Amino acid sequence: MQAINPWASQQFKDYARLRDEFGIQEFNFELPDAPRLFRRGIIIGHRDFHLIHDRIIHRRPFAVLTGLMPSGRMHFGHKMTIDQVVYYQNHGGDVHIAVADIEAYAARGIPLEKAREIALEEYVPSYIALGVDPGKAEVYFQSRRREVKDLAWKLGKKINLNEFLKIYGFEGEANMAHMFSPLVQVGDILHVQLDRFGGRRPTVVPVGVDQDPHIRLTRDLVDRWRMFSVIPQGDKIGVFYRGEDAAKVLNEIAPLVESLGLKVELNIPYKALYASEFKGAEEAVMRINETLLEYESKINEFGFFTPSATYHRLITGLTGGKMSSSIPESAIFLTDTPEEARKKVMRAKTGGGATLEEHRKYGGKPEECSVYEFFAYHLIEDDKYLLEIYESCKRGERVCGKCKKEAAGIVEEWMREFRERREWARDLVKEIVKDE
Ligand code: TRP
Ligand code: SF4
């Protein structure tokens, strides 16, 4: 992968620490036609993405599930999630986007009707205008999808309050609806593996790093509902059965695992099966799990593939801090007028020198510049040209006034075209929204 990753310094360190702390893997997969968020190190981590990579490469089915809270207005930070969704959609994924209206109700006090209006008027037309295809994707409301809510309360049976509080820093005064909303998100992520929504298959959840607690919760719950755990141990892979009647079950799965071309030994008292003589452990674990999930499907109420996740950097706001709906100047909203958008870019915080002389002499700091970030995340497709911007800024040849003008011009033009596409998309909203 041709990686242009000019931030590898400061911010990167924080993300590296985050990864270490929570066991997130660094993202370095080669993807066909990798879009810029992947090429530029903006996707900073993943969990079990190899399951999805495998499906993309072999053109086998996988699901894509993400969700957005219809609370504030939709901005370029949210666009990053949708850009990834569109990539997967174009590489074989079937897409499901949750309108997180239960979460918005519980955590932000937004009435369901209001959330619905915001979603239908603003978010959904923008998804379509960004390339989400009603033929390959659906948008649904958490509050209207019974399977999501059922999974929420059922799967919740396997986590207790102490474990839950270890993941989430809820305090005593937290309202119970808010506390329940992570389980609803678990329901979102897993319900696409129910037969009605396409059946058991790997699922990728593209999110900002802030969403990792939900991902960990979901993955733990999946693991706890499984009949087996599959763990590589040196030159063997251990399959450990968790239920009763180990002799019967292990003798039933032995030929299935053997048919994958693996050598199999049983240890009934340990409730274990050991597979060996494989080439790569990761590949073998994947195939064993596929086979076991097929077997489990007849017996186990909830045998899901462990969902995969990718994590993107959170885009810096134009004012320097967070990009947030609650700080209008920090964000460009997708419904801003082209003129508003241009003005926001012109007022953005840059990484330029204190004075023009200093800038010329010492160069700018693109890695600390919200305008440069905008170029990299959203505005420039050509990697070479982006690198040129980076280097000419560093050398002090490129100056902020002109540079911002260039960015503002691209943004303005983009917004103009986008507005038209969004108007066109309004007619497609009812095609993509699946209400039940
Ligand atoms: N919690 C997410 C947010 O705050 C929204 C969300 C709901 C979500 N369900 C999801 C994200 C499922 C990813 C997957 O924006
Ligand atoms: Fe940012 Fe451009 Fe100024 Fe460099 S020249 S600091 S990239 S605005």
Image (cartoon, rainbow, N blue to C red):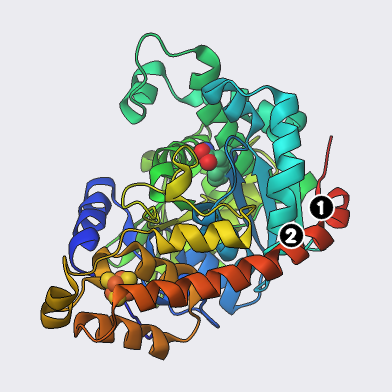
The answer for how far apart the CA atoms under marks 1 and 2 are is 9 Å
Is the C-beta separation of discs 1 and 2 under 8 Å?
Answer: yes
**Residue 128: assigned label:** 2
- Where residue 49 appears, as percent x and y from the top left, is 46, 63
> Residue at position x 34%, y 18% from top?
162
Foreground of the two, 98 or 347: 347
Q: Earlier in the sequence, mark 1 or mark 2?
A: 2
The picture quadrant for ligand 2 comes to bottom left
> Residue at position x 36%, y 41% from top?
270
Q: In the figure, residue 213 lies in which quadrant? A: top left
Q: Secondary structure at mark 1?
A: helix
Per the image, the residue denoted by label 1 is 432
Q: In the figure, residue 231 lies in which quadrant? A: bottom left
Please identify the quadrant where the N terminus is shown: bottom left
Q: In the rendered view, would you say 368 is above or below 119?
A: below
- Where residue 279 appears, as percent x and y from the top left, is 39, 78
Q: In the rendered view, would you say 38 is above or below 72?
A: below
Q: Is residue 265 left or right of residue 184?
A: left
Query: What amino acid type should be assigned to the residue bearing mark 2?
Result: Ile
Query: What amino acid type should be assigned to the residue bearing mark 1?
Result: Ile
Q: Nearer the viewer, mark 1 or mark 2?
A: 2
- Where residue 164 appears, as percent x and y from the top left, is 39, 24
Crowding at dot 1, Cα within 10 Å, few <14 / some 14-19 / many 20+, comes out as: many
Crowding at dot 2, Cα within 10 Å, few <14 / some 14-19 / many 20+, comes out as: many
- Where residue 163 appears, as percent x and y from the top left, is 35, 24
Q: In the rendered view, would you say 138 is above or below 397?
A: above
Foreground of the two, 86 or 388: 388
On the question of residue 19 being in view, the answer is: yes
Q: Secondary structure at mark 2?
A: helix
Please identify the quadrant where the C terminus is shown: top right
